[in-house]
Image (cartoon, grey):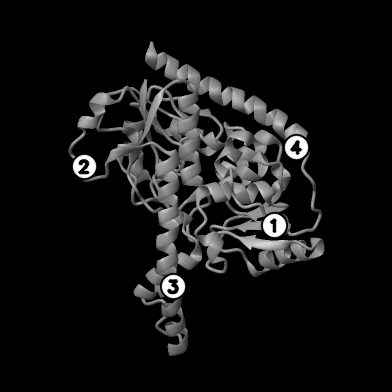
Amino acid sequence: MKIAIDTIVDYSNYGNRLQNYALQKVLENQGHEVITLKNYTHVEADEPKSVRIKRLLREGHFIDKSYRKIVKKWKGLRQSKKYNALRVQNFVAFTNTYIHESNYEINQDTTDFSFDEDIDCYVVGSDQVWNCNFSRFSSFDFISFSTKPRISYAASFGINDVPDKFVPAYKTGLNTFDDISVREEAGKRLVEQMSDKNAEVVLDPTLLLSPTEWLSLAVNRKEYTEKYILVYFLGSPTRKDKQYIKQYAKKRHLQVKQLVTYADLDLWVADPAEFINLFSQAEAIFTDSFHACVFSIMFDKYFEAFTRHYDGPSMNSRLETLFRDLGLEERWHRNDSNYQEIDYVKVKERLAQRQRESMQFLTRALSAIER
């Protein structure tokens, strides 16, 4: 079949680009022809704090600061504009190399859907395609423009509750699906509350590929000679969290590498393939990111997950589901220094079972459509 993936397309978000690649790869491995519908959106919920400076300045949040501090921030903005452009350029290059995007773009203003004639089936997911807090959210993520078969794979709401005003749109959209799978238990509950459909909880597609398949993206990448821990926060870590991480590294004589911060411009512009490379070589990972936890598990790394601090509803549901599935509930950072190691033999046994169950859903759903 010719399958179109409908997902968030964000040329600045590692998890977004890697889940898109993984779902494409899994579908192609099953013999399907796959494209991703191009609909570029930058999702502010995953925006690191440092990137928000320009917007905050425009909104007047720094008007009470000294002139010197304002000038300093503006100088930083001139530099950040250059590196932000290079970052997006590298993400686009990765996308052009590894992801088969459509040569047309759809958005809420699109009126020409003639491409639908060439599509046999739509797969919606993964990522937070059904998060109504995102400005991009629309009926398009329920494929309202088509009558073709559709399923969701690991679609995520990213939230635990849906405001009443959005419930009718969800009910209408969800009831058009042939099969529904979601990424977290909260998503299953929401689907079954707001529609007549059942939902199955499956793994994020990034967990369906093997470490070898992921490392194929990092061939000929830099081999780091120094040992390091990797820090990747999408929210704002507390001062106490920062001190804890610093002490962990100091005690073990490890360098600290940080993603998504202007403090390390080389890593700020790193593309998704370098993201894989960094995780594969790290000694330990400290993060509030779902996909950072995924790749820590993929490469058998010590890691600790922190609650994300940002202005918005909790996004912990997907991590809670993942940790419960794999017996990793103790990976939440608890403010103590027990440094409990991970029994990856047991983790990988549970992961293999969940992989089989997730693939069974996908194969069954697509086979039903083909018949």
Q: Residue 65: x percent and y percent?
A: 45, 85
Camera-side residue of 159 and 121: 121
In the displayed structure, 121 sits above or below 159; it is above
- The residue under label 4 is 344
**Where the N terminus falls, by quadrant?**
top left
Q: Residue 76: x percent and y percent?
A: 45, 75
Q: Residues within 10 Å of mark 1 (few under 14, many from 20)?
A: many
Helix, strand or loop under label 1: strand
Tell me which corner region of the image, top left, top right, bottom left or bottom right, holds residue 5.
top left
Q: Residues within 10 Å of mark 4 (few under 14, many from 20)?
A: some
Q: Earlier in the sequence, mark 4 or mark 2?
A: 2
Q: Earlier in the sequence, mark 2 or mark 3?
A: 3
Helix, strand or loop under label 2: loop
* Mark identifier at residue 238: none
Closer mark to the observer between disc 2 and disc 3:
3
Q: Residue 113: x percent and y percent?
A: 21, 33
- The residue under label 3 is 79
Q: Residues within 10 Å of mark 3 (few under 14, many from 20)?
A: few
Helix, strand or loop under label 4: helix
- The residue under label 1 is 229
Measured Cα–Cα span from mark 1 to mark 2: 45 Å
